[in-house]
Image (cartoon, grey):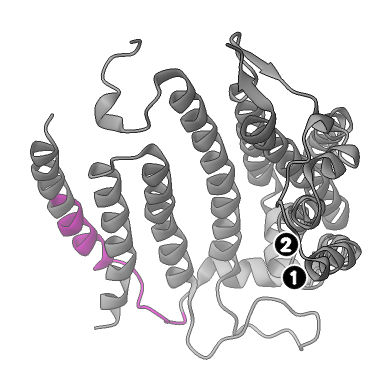
Amino acid sequence: MSPRGRLIVFLFGGAGLAVLFVLATGHLPDFGGSWHPYGERTVSNALLRQTPNVVSSINFDQRAFDTLGEELILMASALAAVVVLRGVRAEQEEDAGAHAYGPAEVFDALRITGYLLLPVTLVAGVYIVAHGYLSPGGGFQGGIVLGSAIHLIYLAGDYPALARVRPVPMFESGEAVAAGVFVLLAVAVTGHVTAMNAAVGLEVGCAVVLVLARFFDQALLVRTSS
Amino acid sequence: MSHLAYLIPAWILLVGVYGIVTSRNLVHAVVCLSVAQSATYVLLLMIGYRRHATAPVFSDVKPTGNVVDPVVQALTLTDIVVGATVTALLLALTVQVAKRRGTVDPDRLRSLEP
């Protein structure tokens, strides 16, 4: 289909969607109104279960089963990304130590800032995971912080340094163990918000590290053999 | 009048879909899909909004019933996490398409194999 024809089809479809959307919003509750039946019930339930962060209580206690499904989607996507990015026949992977890949000329000030920020970011990630039941945060958010903290080594230094502190098989096992623990917690013993936060934090952190590791390999190490 | 605000997510969704339809680059298409998906975050948070209410976190305040809806906030959290991993998967597919076909222009990817 020509770009012009595609645009015409989109105009019809978009106009139809817009009309249906406007008709549907007519039946929504008023914006900013005070009618929130589900919200009120979940707030009182969360207070009964002694979880001050109601969002965490919903994710890991009241709707833990739904979060289990979401968790498995996350694992499946991360796994699929890792599988899709594996090397193919006509490629060979170079050794991580063969090149000093990284931001080529890093200022000393940036390098020191990166190394100083690394422990701070790791502690902040653990804090966000551990305090998820009490204050805004939780396993998903803290896991992302933990997973990206390790990559400060790449930003402040080079790729071989990152490859040394990031043994991929360990993160693969961590991902699998965390997913298994989460399934057990969600099915067998519900209501342990902190434990579930920790499992999710480990799983998300490992998934971020694994997916980024494959992208790094693609960008820096995989070369088509001639 | 208060329902006019609900048109914002519809606009974001249509802008994202327009970007996908007119895209000439798969990376651009993936980013446009993220824009279209962010319409769902805005819609969910709008439904949960409540005037003059606080966040549904009671770690340092006395619990009151006057908070924004936490259910849709939890749904939005779920949405963002799934969206991020799906984006990673789509970008991985784009990397492989670029390697095997030598192009990331959707118009030049007609047949399944060259």
Over which residues does the magenta segment extend? Answer: A16-34
Query: On the image, numbered disc 1 is attached to which residue?
Result: A53
Q: In the image, residue B4 lies at what x, y percent?
A: 25, 77
State the separation of the CA atoms marked 2 and 1: 6 Å
Q: In the image, residue B36 lies at what x, y percent?
A: 37, 53
- On screen, A177 above or below A24? above
- On screen, A12 above or below A91? below
Q: Is residue A215 magenta?
A: no
Who's the residue at 83% across and 64% down the image? A121
Nearer the observer, B9 or A221: A221
Three-letter residue code for mark 1: Asn
- Picture disc at residue A56: 2
In this rendering, the count of numbered labels is 2
Could one spot residue A32 in this view of the protein?
A: yes
Nearer the observer, A204 or A182: A204
Q: Disc 1: which chain?
A: A
> Are discs 2 and 1 less than 8 Å apart at CB?
yes
The picture quadrant where one finds residue B13 is bottom left
- On screen, A26 above or below A12? below
Q: In the image, residue A171 lies at what x, y percent?
A: 84, 35
